[in-house]
């Protein structure tokens, strides 16, 4: 490993958030940056992402971050100044629908606030929605919103894209190194202790996701993040769900399903509600009960009648870093000068990753942030200024 022990900033974690932070630090002119990951770039929960990109949120602060991030996804190669870079973007649009009931007013209010922010958005009737997604039924929909500038991308590709661009600008990313502790001198951050010795830096950015409880052990400051396992299914139906067909969010289903094309006749589907709490952070594959597959399959068949005959082509699990209000903690921890954190993305961090990387990099360098991150401060869990979504608990937020 590198003999150099002294850096301006050390980033812990090389998922899509840590690599984005590293890239943005370099872009802002700070190239003496060390990124450490105990495994490999993107091998944490980033590789488990469904990759959906939308600006639809009921929490207005999230809309701002998603809007800022979309501009990056929209032309990732230009943003990274690397014409060969790709986010694997599929610009298929995003449909969200609600029947009469408790989700209707939240949906209307969220769509209106998106519009007020100049986000391209259309209200569709059932026939127009069917034109876009002919395999679904919309006869019960009381309100349908359509965001054409949305879709899905590949979170692993984005993480490796940020990492490559960061390395080109001089950032050092080292895999297979575990951070064991935070070093402090006179209360200020001075670096980290690792499986490969000590590294010095006056600023450390933790992008550790479900492992953010390490911060609690190292500093005594509570990190309110719980690892929660979610299952994703790829169902193979009799009809195609092509890349031209939009992502679909079904607010009328018990599990608030989200669905997208998985290519050919396959649909990637998962529930958008609370998952299985794990007693310790671990992103290894978990069991998916047959009962769960049947339950999700029944909800899919209700919305996509021909998928009543679908089979499970593949299935996997992933783990969310869930906070009490299902929104991230971003920014400095004032009690530990020099420590900046970005964790608790609660299953929706990929679509925010470009903006979050920029804002955390600005925060780490003591610069004003382009978008105000004060609402995401850890302190909100003490003061009660929670970022509560209108849809209840879940990653739609
Ligand atoms: C099933 C699933 C579906 C999802 N779908 C979507 C979606 O459709 N759209 C969306 O926007 N988001 C989605 N998300 C969320 C999104 O993927 C995550 O928010 C994002 O990938 C998190 O990135 P990260 O960099 O914070 O975390 P990670 O990728 O988990 O990276 C954290 C890294 O930190 C490293 N690390 C931790 N502690 C240490 C230590 N002590 N020393 C060294 N290294 C350490 C780990 O090894 C890991 O590589 C989904 C997530 C899951 C699980």
Image (cartoon, rainbow, N blue to C red):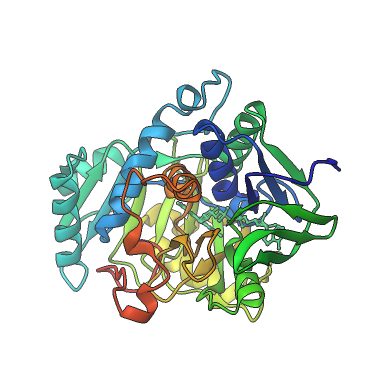
| Count of number-bearing discs | 0
User: Residue at left 68%, top 46%?
Assistant: 35
Can residue 17 be seen here? The reply is yes
Q: Quadrant of the C terminus?
A: bottom left
Relative vertical location of residue 80 with respect to residue 334 in this rendering, above or below: above
Residue 269 place in picture, x, y as percent: 48, 56
Closest to the observer: 386 or 44? 386
User: Residue at left 29%, top 51%?
Assistant: 63
Residue 393 place in picture, x, y as percent: 36, 73
User: Residue at left 61%, top 50%?
Assistant: 15
Residue 311 place in picture, x, y as percent: 57, 56
Q: Give the quadrant of ligand 1.
A: bottom right
Residue 380 place in picture, x, y as percent: 35, 73
Q: Residue furthest front?
A: 186
Quadrant of the rendered image containing residue 21? top right
User: Residue at left 13%, top 52%?
Assistant: 112
Image check: 22 left or right of 243? right
């Amino acid at each position: 490993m590198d003999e150099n022990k002294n850096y301006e900033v050390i980033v812990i974690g090389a998922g899509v958030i840590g690599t984005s932070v590293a890239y943005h630090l370099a872009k802002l002119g700070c190239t003496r940056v060390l990124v450490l990951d105990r495994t490999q770039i993107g091998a944490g929960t980033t590789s488990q992402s469904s990759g959906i990109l939308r600006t639809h949120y009921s929490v207005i602060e999230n809309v701002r971050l998603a809007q800022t991030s979309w501009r990056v996804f929209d032309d990732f190669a230009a943003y990274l100044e690397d014409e060969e870079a790709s986010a694997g973007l599929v610009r298929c649009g995003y449909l969200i629908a609600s029947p009469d009931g408790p989700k209707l007013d939240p949906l209307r209010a969220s769509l209106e606030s998106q519009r007020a922010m100049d986000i391209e958005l259309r209200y569709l009737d059932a026939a127009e929605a069917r034109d876009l997604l002919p395999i679904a039924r919309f006869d019960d929909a009381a309100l349908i919103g359509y965001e054409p500038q949305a879709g899905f991308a590949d979170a692993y590709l984005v993480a490796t894209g940020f990492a490559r661009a960061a390395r080109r600008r001089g950032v050092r990313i080292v895999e297979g190194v575990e951070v064991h502790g935070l070093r402090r001198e006179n209360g200020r951050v001075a670096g980290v202790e690792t499986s490969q010795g000590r590294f010095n830096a006056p600023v450390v950015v933790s992008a550790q996701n479900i492992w953010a409880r390490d911060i609690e052990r190292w500093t005594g400051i509570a990190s309110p993040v719980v690892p929660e396992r979610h299952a994703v299914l790829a169902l193979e139906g009799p009809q195609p769900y092509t890349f031209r067909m939009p992502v679909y969010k079904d607010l009328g289903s018990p599990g608030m399903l989200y669905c997208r094309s998985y290519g050919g006749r396959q649909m990637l589907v998962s529930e958008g509600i609370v998952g299985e709490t794990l007693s310790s952070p671990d992103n290894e594959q978990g069991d998916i009960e047959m009962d769960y597959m049947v339950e999700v399959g029944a909800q899919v068949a209700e919305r996509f009648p021909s998928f009543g005959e679908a089979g499970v082509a593949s299935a996997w699990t992933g783990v969310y870093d869930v906070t009490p209000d299902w929104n991230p903690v971003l920014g400095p921890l004032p009690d530990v000068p020099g420590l900046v954190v970005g964790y608790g993305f609660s299953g929706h961090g990929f679509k925010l990753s470009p903006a979050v990387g920029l804002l955390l990099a600005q925060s780490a360098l003591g610069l004003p942030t382009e978008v105000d991150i004060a609402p995401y401060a850890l302190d909100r869990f003490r003061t009660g200024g929670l970022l509560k979504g209108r849809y209840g608990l879940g990653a739609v937020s």
